[in-house]
Image (spheres, rainbow, N blue to C red):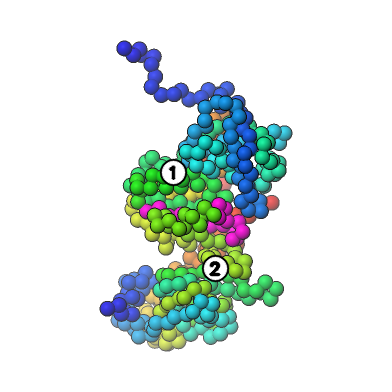
Amino acid sequence: MASDLDISVQPAPGIADAMVPHLYVIRQVRKETDDTFTLVLQDESGGPKLTFAPGQFNMVYVFGAGEIPISISGDPTSSVLVHTTRAVGTVTRVMARLRRGDMLGIRGPFGTPWPLQDVHGHDVVIVAGGIGLAPLRPALYDVLSHRDEFGKVVLLYGTRTPSDILFREELEQWRARFDLEVYVTVDRAQAGWRGNVGVVTTLIHKSPFDPQKTTAMVCGPEIMMRFTALELQKRGVSPDSIYLSLERNMKCGIGLCGHCQFGPLFVCKDGPVFSYSRIKDLLVKREI
Amino acid sequence: METLERILAEHLFFKDLDEPYLQLVTGCASNVRFAPDEFIFREGEEANQFYLIRQGRVALQILAPDRGPITVETLEEGDILGWSWLIPPYNWHFDARALEMTRAIALDAKCLRRKCEEDHNLGYELLKRFGHIMEQRLSSTRLQLLDMYGVRS
């Protein structure tokens, strides 16, 4: 007979566990664009495989440079860990110089995932802007691996120029599928580009989905996400069915340090994925 | 049978337009087709039509001496192309070029302008509808100008 003390779920990791990085070795470095790269990592610490839900992030420790939050961009079922980031700050610039065989420290995964378990039977609209495609890619992998459980699936992707398009080969493969609609647009086009030109929000009113039974997942610059949410609402998608992934100054990953406080929320713990209805008033508050 | 009137009536732009006005607009409409790379109109030319794109894709371009044609926006199936016919001096400000085989309904804007002058209710109806498109395009252009995906300096 079970005692009152038995528990059927795993306890949440303690603070100490969450604060200790695990060593990962870089197995592959892929250059995605001029300033964006992907690292494929493997656990060297011999611990259990890191499992994550699409939308979660890790704290990545670049030795000698610092620790930063980076979304996981790989397949949740894969045996390796994949991070895609842009070389824009002190830490990511050092990270961009790392090569195969170099080591990184990883803490995580942290944060809330995309609501994939709750939207079976729905149409799924994924709207990505720039490097925002990276945290959405695991969600797309997940949807495609359970394709029958969803209605229409649409990927809308906007970037600055054609040379900034991420995961180009994969986009072509996705575009070739009959069960996935992929639309790509760029803000500015060089000569020779025959695709769409215009902001990603312009794709929404033309996309084939039923707004009454659609869940939208949006990631990109915050302005782009705000306007995307407005456009989705114009199409008839409920604010409760729109999810955004926010980026703030995450440090501890467990809501202790307060660096990523966003009004009454901590982005590292309560997010980074939030329903639009929960944060829409906060997004336009200058004071926070 | 797919008549021009039915196609126009089913298009969002003409939705709920009074029947007599729809007939009047249909009287100014014709089917047109453009081959890939063909110019639909060019900067500076008289703006005497607007187009409802039925199939294909059109690039709005501006020519820069050192850079060649720069595409500022693309339009495709369902989009309305051209509003310079509404605003004096009725000249196109950009080039419009078919990127692929493009089918459209061309509306004789010279004819419509005259009818709008004669019947201001029709003029107001069309202006409201174009105002909506202008607002959307202005908003998109503002977002493009923000260079949202650029690196913050």
Label 2 sits on residue: A194
**Where A258 falls versus A194 (above or below)?**
above
Residue type beneath disc 1: Asp
Q: Between residue A158 and residue A277, name the one nearer to us.
A: A158
Expressed as whole percent of the image width and height from the top left, the position of residue A107 reads 58, 31
Q: Residue furthest right?
A: A64
Does the segment drawn in magenta span residue A163?
yes
Question: Which residue is drawn at the image coordinates 59% and 64% (left, top)?
Answer: A188
Residue B23 appears in the figure: yes
Please determine if labels 2 and 1 lie on a single subunit: yes
Answer whether residue A177 is magenta in the image. Answer: no
Start and end of the magenta stretch? A152-168
Above or below, A241 relative to B76: above
Q: Regarding mark 2 in the picture, which secondary structure is present there?
A: loop
Kindly report the distance in space between the C-alpha atoms of the residues bearing marks 2 and 1: 30 Å
Q: Label 1: which residue? A: A142
Considering the numbered disc 1 on the image, is that residue within a helix, a strand or a loop?
helix
Q: How many marks?
A: 2
Estimate the x, y position of residue A41 in percent, counting from the top left: 59, 37
Residue A137 percent location from the top left of the image: 50, 47
Asked if residue A5 lies left or right of residue A20, the reply is: left
Residue, x 47% and y 38% (percent of image)? A77
Residue at 53% from the left image edge and 22% from the top image edge: A14
- The residue drawn where x is 51% and y is 67% is B137
- Judging depth in this view, the residue of A138 and A102 nearest the camera is A102
- Displayed quadrant of residue B27: bottom left
A15 or A121: nearer the viewer: A121
